[in-house]
Image (cartoon, grey):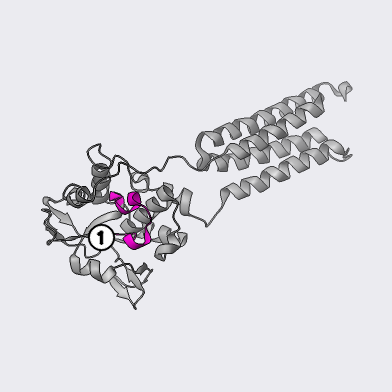
Amino acid sequence: MKKIYMAFICIIFVFLLSSCQRDVVVFEPGNLLSEEQTKFALQATDLNPSNPNQVRLIYSHTYESKVWDGQRYDREHVWPDSKLSTTAQKRDLHNIRACDKTVNQLKADRLFIDAPGIIFYQRVDTLFFYPGLWDQGDVARIIMYMVKTYDLDPKEVGLNYKTLIKWHEADPVDQFELNRNIAISSDTLQGNENYFISYPDLAYQYFDQSSNIGLIWFIGLVMYIVLMLVAYKYQFEFVKRDDLYMGFSAIFVLFSLICGFIWSWWGMLLILCGLGLLVFYGIKRLGLHQNPKSM
């Protein structure tokens, strides 16, 4: 019976591990708009929070009358249009920003690059472009959205995960981005939101590679199972197996607590499993001490 119980616990652990997902939201493209709709949509999406008659221009961080006539400002595809393969990608409003025509031509389809110490947007040699201190976070969150929604590689636009997180932190979400995100997610436009604007902490779950909590937890789980099986297989004279089980259960609870901050309710389920094991062996150990003859 004990062997069956141990096997059952191991199976449950493996099942929970395989079921744990870091995806807490679903990234899906919104409504496909026409080419004309993407032009006039900027009059509603890129409004200056301080003046609803103006749009904010990306990179230059200046303002222009919101009326679209094809002359006042241009449409900038943050992820260059030439590097996108589908119509949905090319017309996604989250990737299209109002931009000064001259600045748009300067940026063209150049790759982004981090430029520490530089404040304003500028072309860096012939291949690269820095978006400027005040728009690097906007760019990072747009790129993150495109990566998760369309399964793209940020290296295609010159960025890596480390730079995305750096820009995301250096230039946090502001009211302009929040308003823009709400406008795009309305049913009259695209109907989906950029979750990295709505929930900025999601960036760390998907793009922060500085610490892989999942890998740490997996290593802890493997050690836990191996040590429990070894303790069951061999009789230790200096330590009772039930005491070892309690120790292993406590370790499992510790790793699950860390996991709980990453994997939401799955983490809570793991914590409950670990606590259950801890209580089980604790009660069993207490019963053995109260009834020494049973040993």
Q: Position of residue 18 (x, y in %)?
A: 61, 39
Which residue is at the front of the view, 240 or 133?
Answer: 133
- Residue occupying the point 24% across, 56% down: 97
In the rendered image of this protein, does residue 27 appear above or below residue 266? below
Residue stretch in magenta: 76-94
Q: Position of residue 143 (x, y in %)?
A: 37, 56
Q: Quadrant of the N terminus?
A: top right
Which residue is at the front of the view, 182 or 5?
Answer: 182
- Residue occupying the point 73% across, 25% down: 283
Q: Position of residue 244 (x, y in %)?
A: 77, 38
Instruction: Indicate the quadrant where residue 165 lies.
Output: bottom left
Q: Secondary structure at mark 1?
A: strand
Q: Quadrant of the C terminus?
A: top right
Instruction: Indicate the quadrant where residue 182 lies.
Output: top left
The answer to if 88 sits in the magenta stretch is yes
Disc 1 residue type? Glu
- Residue occupying the point 17% across, 47% down: 44
Q: What residue did someone put label 1 on?
A: 76
